[in-house]
Image: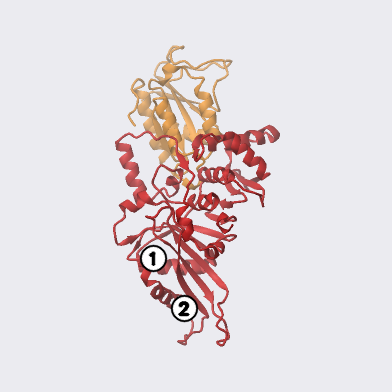
Chain colours: A orange, B red
Amino acid sequence: MSVLRPLDKLPSLNTATILLVGTEDALLQQLADSMLKEDCASELKVHLAKSLPLPSSVNRPRIDLIVFVVNLHSKYSLQNTEESLHHVDASFFLGKVCFLATGAGRESHCSIHRHTVVRLAHSYQSPLLYCDLEKQGRGSCQAQLKRCCLQEPQLPIPR
Amino acid sequence: MDSYDASESTPRQSTSSRPEDYFIGATFLQKRLESVRKQTSFIPTPPRRKIPHCSQLQEDVDPQKVAFLLHKQWTLYSLTPLYKFSYCNLKEYSRLLNAFIVAEKQKGLAVEVGEDLNIKVIFSTLLGIKGTQKDPEAFLVQILSKSQLPSENREGKVLWTGWFCCIFGDSVLETVSEDFTCLPLFLANGAESNTAIIGTWFQKTFDCYFSPLAINAFNLSWMAAMWTACKMDHYVATTEFLWSVPCSPQSLDISYAIHPEDAKALWDSVHKTPGEVTQEEVDLFMDCLYSHFHRHFKIHLSATRLIRVSTSVASAHTDGKIKVSLNNLVK
């Protein structure tokens, strides 16, 4: 079983690669599209994955940031995230992992309590962002925050 | 004893460390608490709930009055505290509300002053429906149709019922000032139009605000676990769950019925600490159901949304409708 390690490949010049991990394809696609629309100093590549471990057969660049997308409406996405976290090397958690919780806006549809995700992010010492892609404009706000994460990869963002 | 009170205390606004705190997410008090929590970087612990034991208050409960609350579908609303509400003025309120309803219903029609609309409004208190002694008394509002024949003085048919209650509202009551009566839960049964008229009157008279209370999947799973946990002599209905699958264009509903004794057996194998229910136990209970379903149908129920839970004790729907079927007090 392959574990994602942060420094196992050489970095590509002037390029940042973000890996989005989540169960919902449409959501990840929307998030990736909104991120790519933003202007960025360096070139940005976004990879999408349903879960980890990633297939080792594909040639991919070094991953600079992993974003675990948890949909608060679906317990399945939380379980998927928890299982995927086991395939990430511990050194990734020094500022290269971020949790993104979506769907908090529709309280009536939530199957997971918000604090469950807060505890998860706290136990992995990684920042937790909230995002609501149903509302226009928020997606780009989150993309900007993620840009901050990328520019300072060693510093965890204070919550 | 436990079953009635447990089912009553679940859909409640309470800011103690209970999961239903997060029910009414947008209230002012909630926001205030959240900001305080953020400042102290509070890391929340998994919620646990005590199964309430309210033995001393049950002596006050009138079984007849309480019995009619059963087997009816109630629509839930959350209510802000009532300003200058007094339990001594109930007769006065009945009269005022009666006049208001009559006026509202006759709006736009050529009116003749008189008792055309044969309705009667009654306010009464419901003793004993509370969690602790500090909770304000619950009260009931009923609209009855008056008999057409003046010679018969019989009570007419109940057209609409609504009741206000507060159960285990300790932490909320601390923050509310003296002039306010805090009865955050309102349950209504009857025509929507009547609910709207009565809501308007209350809002005007007591400067409060009603909002429909939705029950999210997280809280429904807690209700399912707690109602399954109730010890019962015999079960009258199967335990049923209903999930809504989010897919376009039409949503798909999945219904899962379990024999209530099997559900109780499953709960007993999961439940560890007596007198208390923890988040882990609820999650494990639901996960067992999900994995069983997945084994047979290869469908991940955890990716869908729980919208309805129905047990022998009570049933609840995500739109804020509950029905209580069992009252051990009557025994």
Question: Which label is found at residue B17?
Answer: none
**Between B263 and A92, which is closer to the camera in this rendering?**
B263
Residue B252 in sight from this viewpoint? no
Look at the numbered discs 1 and 2 and tell me whether their residues touch, using CB distance below 8 Å.
Answer: no
- Residue at point 55%, 32% (across, down): A23
- Residue at point 39%, 60% (across, down): B209
Mark 1 vs mark 2: tell me if same chain: yes
The disc, 1 or 2, on the residue closer to the chain's N-terminal end is 2
Left or right: where does residue B201 sit relative to residue B247? left
- Relative to B196, say whether B39 is above or below: above
Q: Secondary structure at mark 2?
A: helix
Q: Which residue corresponds to mark 1? A: B203
Please, which chain is the residue tagged with disc 1 on? Answer: B
Residue B154: image quadrant is bottom right
Amino acid, disc 2: Val
Q: Secondary structure at mark 1?
A: helix
Structural distance between the alpha carbons of marks 1 and 2? 17 Å
**Between A141 and B46, which is closer to the camera in this rendering?**
B46
In x, y percent, where is residue B115?
Answer: 49, 84
In x, y percent, where is residue B268?
Answer: 59, 37
